[in-house]
Amino acid sequence: MTNIKATLARLNIKYDNFFSEESLYTSGMADEMLDVLRQQGKIIEHDGAQWFSEDGSPIRAGQGHKQSSADYALEPTHRPDEDNEAVPDADEKGRKLPVQAVVIRSARVIADPDERPTYFASDIPYAWNKVMLRGFNPAVYVWGEDHQADVPRVLAVARLLGIPDGAVRIIIYRFITLLRDGQEVRMGKRKGNAIWIDDVLDE
């Protein structure tokens, strides 16, 4: 966090508040919001995982164990480590389908032995906290294009939790392409070749 704040200072960006994701769980708010959705019949179990289903319908993915990201792939994908935590959001004719996405992992759905919350599970109580408790209306989210798939699920949850229409606004920005010696630089943290903002500023 210290390094992040130092980088933001170089960009003349000042945050009034840094919010702890962990506090959503230690405060019990995450469980409380999931219970609200569970009482509405919107949280269901499938393949050992807990899923959010916008209309309470069964999960559309296939049966049995799912170890491959292709089984639950959604294009564009969710965060890179969660590309199998959602199902297609449109049918073969392109018609919109109700949102369905994992909130609590299971090894049968994701190759991860820990049954832990997904990022989407944190998005649920955070929307409530930001709008209903801290009074941000509208609450404006600014996300990269790799989070495009998150938009319908967050808006669906906000509606079901009783958050006023229009109170959650999400802006998606496009990524830039960096060139070095006229060639596109392909980046990836997992590959160890990420280019940090500080590197760009130094150049």
Image (cartoon, rainbow, N blue to C red):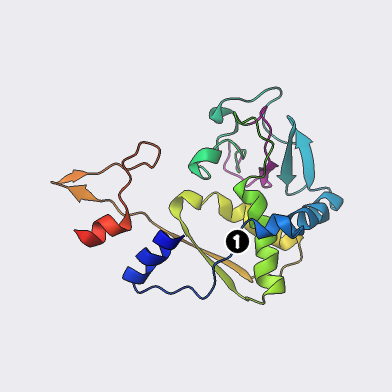
- State the residue position of label 1: 20
- The one of 167 and 130 positioned closer to us in this rendering: 130
Rendered position, 77 above or below 128: above
Position of 9 with respect to 182 (left or right) is right
Q: What is the count of numbered marks?
A: 1
Q: Does the image show residue 48?
A: yes
Residue 146 appears left or right of 175: right
How far across and how far down the image is residue 89, in percent?
61, 43
Task: Find residue 62 and report its horizontal and vertical position in percent.
Answer: 68, 26
Residue 102 within the segment the image draws in magenta: yes
Quarter of the figure with residue 64: top right
Q: Looking at the image, can residue 164 be seen? A: no
Say if 72 sits above or below 176 in the image.
above
Residue occupying the point 72% across, 46% down: 52
* Secondary structure mostly seen in the magenta stretch: loop
At which x and y percent is residue 30?
73, 55
Q: Looking at the rendering, which quadrant does residue 133 occupy?
A: bottom right
The residue range painted magenta reads: 90-109
Inspect the magenta stretch and tell me whether residue 85 lies in it.
no
Q: Is the residue 186 above or below the residue 133 in the image?
A: above
Please state the horizontal and vertical placement of residue 202, each as a whole percent of the image: 22, 60
Q: Nearer the viewer, residue 18 or 102?
A: 18
Residue farthest along the left direction in this orientation: 181
Residue drawn where x is 63% and y is 50% of the image? 120
Of residues 39 and 13, the one nearer the viewer is: 13
Which quadrant holds residue 10?
bottom left
Q: Amino acid at mark 1?
A: Ser
| SS for dot 1 | loop
Query: Which of 197 and 154 lies nearest the eye of the viewer?
Result: 197
Q: Residue at x 66, y 34 (%)?
A: 114
